[in-house]
Image (spheres, rainbow, N blue to C red):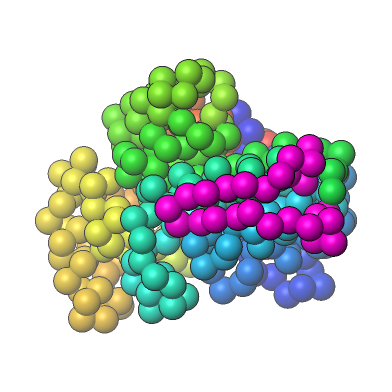
Amino acid sequence: MLIDITLPPLPWDEIPEHARKAEEIGFDCIWMGETSRDPFIPLALAAEHTKRIKIGTSVCVAFPRSPMTVAYTAWDLQTLSHGRFVLGLGTQVRGHMERRFSVRWDPPGSKMREYVSALRTIWDCWQNGRPLNFRGGFYNFSLMTPFFDPGPIKYPHIPIHLAGVNPYMCRLAGEVCDGLHIHPFHSPKYVKEVVLPNIEKGLRESGRKRKDVQLVAGVFIVTGGSEEEIRQTEEYIRFQIAFYASTKTYKKVMELHGWGEISERLYRKSLKGDWASMAGEITDDIFETFAVKGKPHEVIEEVKNRHRGLADRLILYPIPALAHLETSMWGEVI
């Protein structure tokens, strides 16, 4: 099982050293999410200052960007990293699409299916010289002159992963993608009963096998180099769990464990802006279902045990003890 980490929004001049030390310790991939920063530029820095470790978006929000612009960026990062780039795509929820990105809301499942197909058509045009001719319900691409064609590259296969929680996206990942990113707000029970069966449905639809899709699970962990650091991280993770549990998108995860009413209470508090009291709704049972707490070696062993047979790689989130990667204790357990 591969062990990965996220790249926090560090000051720009700290990113190269962070990436180098992550590689030195033995992590397998550095993932960059899209929250307060564009995910691609930090990965370019990480690629430039490393040699082995993979880099990937976990995830970039697809629909505010044309597949063409993402195709160019991914092509460049794949070249810069010498074939180490993984493109992780996500849909985001309607409120963010319409109110943060000012993008029209379309059915996300069918649109993402087309998005993935469009990317591969564009890359095939560049790599193999085929005429660009993609016609869909959401996207149409039919113009690629030599001036705008970057041409073939040494590592043309760019893995595409999808972020998925609910059944449709899991099936879609199984059918058309190279990987599925399971949100940190999950439980082994949810993966076993919801995610895996739908991955299998997608695989059957495409005639592929389980080995053709990499399952990447984000995992909430609480650890650190001091008791105070652990306490602060637990407080932060409790709020994160409460935040995700309050959204309609993740309600089914709570319902599977019989916590639907708690999810409703959290939702009502979020509507009122009562963010301060939400973490108090997260009981120890809920916390221990979605997060792992302990010393680094304890955390690694526990997350591996929880996900054995359920995931191929794990993204530890967050790792405060590795914010500056000064500790050697991780290298002994990765």
Tell me if residue 138 can be seen: yes
**Which residue is pictured at 56% across the width and 21% down the height?**
211
* Quarter-of-image position of residue 146: bottom right
Task: Give whichever of 85, 45 is nearer the camera.
Answer: 85
Range of magenta residues? 125-150
List the single residue furthest toward the left: 261
Task: Give whichever of 291, 91 is nearer the camera.
Answer: 91
On the image, the x and y values in percent for residue 123 come to: 71, 45
- Residue 112 lies in the magenta-colored region: no
**As drawn, 134 above or below 147:** above
On the image, the x and y values in percent for residue 240 come to: 39, 62
Tell me if residue 295 can be seen: no
Quarter of the image that includes the N terminus: top right
**Which residue is pictured at 30% across the width and 77% down the height?**
276
Task: Give whichever of 74, 138 is nearer the camera.
Answer: 138
In the picture, measured across the screen, residue 83 lies left or right of residue 135, that is right
**Which residue is pictured at 38% across the width and 79% down the height?**
99
In the picture, measured across the screen, residue 314 lies left or right of residue 333, that is left
